[in-house]
Amino acid sequence: MDIASVMKPWKTKLLLHLFLFFAGVSTAMSQLSGTINTYTKVTAVNYLCNFITVNSPTGFGAGDKVLIIQMQGAVIDQTNTTAFGNVLDIADAGNYEFAIIDHFSGNDVYFTKTLLRTYTPSGAVQLVSVPQYGAVSVDAELTPTTWDGNTGGVIVFESSDIVTLQANIDASEKGFTGGQKSPNGGDCSTFGLGNYYYTFPSVQTGQKGQGIAAYVTNRSGGRAKQANGGGGGGSHNTGGGGGGNYGAGGRGGDQKCGLDPYGFASLSLSTTYTTNNKIFMGGGGGGGHVNNDQSYNGGNGGGIIIIKAAGINSNGFVIKSNGGSVSTNYINVFGDNGDGNSGGGAGGAVLLDITDYTASTPVEVSGGKGGNTGYTTFNFGPGGGGGGGVVWTKTSTSSINVTSLLAGGTAGISGSGGGNGSGTRWGAVDGSIGAALNALSIPQSTSTSSCALPVELLQFKAFAKGKYEVQLNWSTATELNNAFFTLEKSTDGIHFSPIVKVAGQETSHQQTQYSFTDEVAVYDLLYYRLWQTDIDGRTVDLGIRKVYPEFEKITEVSVYPNPCKDNLYIPLLSSQKEAVQHLVFVNSIGEMIDAKWEETETTLSIHTGALPAGLYSLIVYTKDRNQIIKVLKEQ
């Protein structure tokens, strides 16, 4: 049977994916790849009424689980001494917790429970969606967006079942940014030891690596560390320090002039993890000093990965958040044309709130390698190695089949290409090892907010009432300055249109019931959203409900054998005769394949012999509604 004309509106993969998502039919396994999280910057926190203000609430919904996390905000020493970059107060940096969204009011996001931790928006606080699944298959690499100074750098999701890896989960080099190498300039006679900070860019220094303290205005260059960011190499031709996390970064290498304005090693954040239950991205490596433009920028730190699941089967694939390594300087065989190189980034943090491990699960949070200096007549400063990160689990990794690569990154080599260079580290130092921690407990509040909202909603329900009606009921405990409610309807869960406006109680301290009956004429999943509007025009999203209209006959179909080889069968009861109207297979990359079948009195026989082996979604179009069945085709 040819269904091309019927399927024409659904030819593109994008529309197909939307259809699969909003069809209202659960599938056996969620297939993940790419970036699954949504990020937005937090600009204000209201503890009294338990809400935050964000740049944009797009991509978040009422009832969603989210992660609130502060990336920076530590207070550091700012003096022009070796103490520059020391952490004076960790403050709210590294605070994080799970929360559930209750409702929205413009860009204000309200939570169902009070926040446990405090957050300082100027310290780069972000809200991250936490997708929730049943069984999960990671079919292609899962990765976050790169940290941009405000958002990104985090992968987080939950599974109530088993997470099966068919590819890596990778946040490597997605964390704090490595410092830039210096502009070209300087020689031994012009510059000496250098200051501990400079305005950047400056020919006297590379830039410090980024870390848990934001750059200080006019002080982002110089050899001193930036908390867990490596120090920048000073003139002339010294190496940048490695970034840090649990393990400290290593110092950068010396110059050829006999002086030592190398980039300082970054700090270790080890004591703040278990003592304060904080988490951090890996720090960036410091930039090296150059005057022949032969070097590279510092390595980025690793990001943060948080997985909460019943179990995991790694299949030998890796969960990793390594720091970035720095490439070897360009090789120059014509005398003294070398440069200092930059430090490696630190490993990130991987949190595994997982009960069962089917097999050994490899996790990598290693520091990145410092940059080598190339083939030169003299020695120049290599980059220091990045520190190792953290793997944090509920119980000891030695008892749950988690193998961890926590090593600090190795320092670069001077004269790595041979010649008169020494082929040694020339003062550069490896990063320190990270750690495998246990007793993980991700914070999530259970305390209810006491702030009086304009409307205290008790319930909002939607259910089928006969074949052509949907009943919508909601009730409130209190109302204050409430002008009206608005009900909206959607067939795809994205585009809503208002269907009715219901007057509210300007002031009420007793339970009030509301109801509305919507007449429907489509046999498909429907979405209803309830808004509340104050007298001053302020609106609050009170949530979305979905419902199938009730049908006189709902045709449920099943298939066998599954897995299949040459044929797949759908048994037909007498009440199901002529119920199945169209069939189509969808492969793992979204391509649609028209199904061919033959029908008898009791069975519908689908020819599957020509299908390549793999997992398919079989879309069964019936006269009542559409169904999706997962089918495994074997060779």
Image (tube, rainbow, N blue to C red):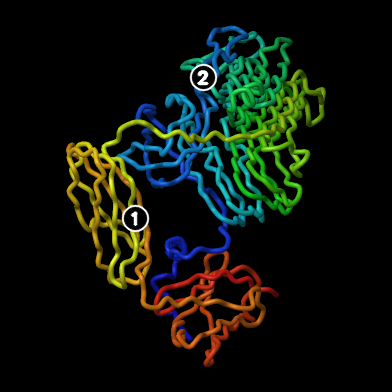
- Label 1 sits on a secondary structure element that is strand
| Residue closer to the observer: 137 or 210 | 137
Please tell me which of labels 2 and 1 falls first in the chain.
2
Image quarter of the C terminus: bottom right
Residue corresponding to mark 1: 461
Is label 2 in a helix, a strand or a loop? loop
Q: Amino acid at mark 1?
A: Lys
Q: Quadrant of residue 306?
A: top right
**In the depicted structure, whether residue 303 falls above or below residue 253:** below
Q: Position of residue 581 (x, y in %)?
A: 44, 82
Residue name at image x 57 percent, y 65 percent = 588
Q: Position of residue 328 (x, y in %)?
A: 71, 33
Quarter location, residue 613: bottom right
User: Which residue shows up at 72% across the image and 16% down it?
Assistant: 254
Q: Residues within 10 Å of mark 1 (few under 14, many from 20)?
A: some
Q: Which one is in front, 428 or 139? A: 139
Which picture quadrant has residue 179? top right
Percent coordinates x, y for residue 230 in the rendering? 63, 22
User: Residue 292 location in percent, x, y?
Assistant: 63, 25
Q: Which residue is mark 2?
A: 91
Q: Residue sitting at 49 percent across and 34 percent down?
A: 445
Above or below residue 403? Residue 135 is below
Q: Is residue 157 above or below residue 98?
A: below
Query: Taking the image as drawn, is residue 420 in sight?
Result: no
Amino acid carrying label 2: it is Ala
